[in-house]
Image (cartoon, rainbow, N blue to C red):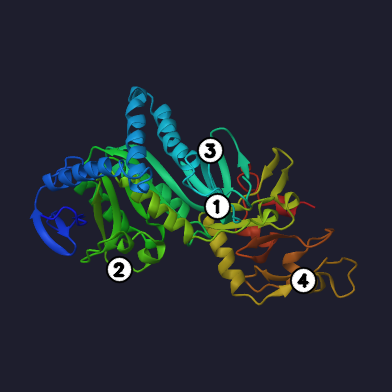
Amino acid sequence: MKYWKILIFLVSLDQRHKYAIFYGNKLISKSKNTHKMEEPDPIHKSISELKSKAREFREKFTEFQGLEREFTFIQDDLIKKYERSSPHRKHPADLGDIREEILREFLSSTGYLPLKYGVSKSSVRIVTQTGHPSNQIDIAIYDSLNSPMLLSYSSLSFLAIESVYGVIQVKSRLSSRDDITEGLNNIASFKKLEGSDNRFGILFAYDCSLKWTTLAETVKDFMCKNTSSVWTNFVVVLNQGLILPREEGTLPYGVRNHCFRNSDLRGISKPDVIGIPDTSNTLLKFYLYLIDLLKSCTVEEPDLYQYVRLPFTTGEKAYRFTYGEIEEIGQCHEHGTYLRKISNETINKIIDICSSSEPTDMLHLFEAAFGSNNVFSADGAQSDQVYLYNPDKLPLVDILTLPNSIGLQCYSLLIDRKICIIPKYYSFRDKLIFECPKCNYPATLYFET
């Protein structure tokens, strides 16, 4: 065996759970062994020993040998810091903070990330202009030069999706399928947000007590059950290696041919995974892949006006009352004030009916309800298109007015960037917008003048 050439060890999960050792693209050996990757085979061990010996010789000739040598030391240091935190294992919350801080310090304090890449100092939630948040994420990398934190506490911060390059979910040890799935789901909660198309997500762990095939199977199972847009870009187990997505039946080799970019993931039709074992260079590969993902991601400054007052969310939909607190807050004579709410089912119903109606404007609605000589005005009505909720095609005067009332009797909602006008007649009749929860939606509220 010519050890001075690059030997790539590929772990490929197939139906028989085999792994293969490849030299270039030539198969050397096959095995049914499913041992964990932290138990190196003789070839794997020999490569690590040769690398160590080569570093010793190189040190006699040059002070800086390259990133490989430096990252070997940094990786050893990170693993030692993780192992020293083991006394805190009785306190999961403390251990969680420690494991995040170890990686956070590497990313933010070593100088390997350019200054324009900010690293969150605490766990974060990413939010969109629609008001939808991600799950709580351990680390976010964001545009530190042009984008502010929307809200920051000592243990939790909020960032706008526009300013975030990607996220990293950190686990101390992957000890069950649930651990893996939980991390993948957290990343998916970020990658499914509106505006996250080219953002990345990485699952990072220091150790894994599962068989490598179990880890691979769990990641592959998640990929098969979810669209590629929410897949993690790759999985890191610092003391064992990496898991990357791939197309079933293909065996990419070489760093630049590995599938971890979003453009690669979108092209996968039959999901599978491939493993790269640790030869004291897992941290270096993580870093190189991370830099690659950061370069391929475009962020922008968030429009802070859109984050002044976020809409309400229900399911995947978002809505806001056009006139703010005037419409949001209701008044019950018996129980006082309450917040009006709308269910996800109702939002979809409103969208369906309003989308099928012809757009109009508020001036037309005023004229139809009160006549062309009315004394009321609709500010900006000529330019704002609105969609009326009127499934029964009733006369507007019958559904938009009440005896002795002033103005239109309706709610104005912004849904999917459309202004939807909901007559109170329909709202109370069909229970579209929840009124006083303690009154169980009494119809008398509508008829009081």
Which of these two is toward me, 373 or 327? 327
N-terminal-most mark, 3 or 1: 3
Which of these two is toward me, 143 or 424? 143
Within-10-Å neighbours for mark 2: few <14, some 14–19, many 20+: few
Determine whether the residue tagged by mark 3 lies in a helix, strand or loop. Answer: loop
Label 4 is placed on what type of residue? Answer: Leu
Report the label total: 4
Q: CA distance from mark 4 to mark 3?
A: 52 Å
The tag on residue 132 is: 1
Where does label 4 land, which residue? 365
Residue 143, how many percent across, how many down?
Answer: 57, 51
Where does label 2 land, which residue? 269
Do labels 2 and 3 touch, CB within 8 Å? Answer: no
As drawn, is 423 to the left or to the right of 74?
right
Within-10-Å neighbours for mark 1: few <14, some 14–19, many 20+: many
Where does label 3 land, which residue? 121
N-terminal-most mark, 4 or 3: 3
N-terminal-most mark, 4 or 1: 1
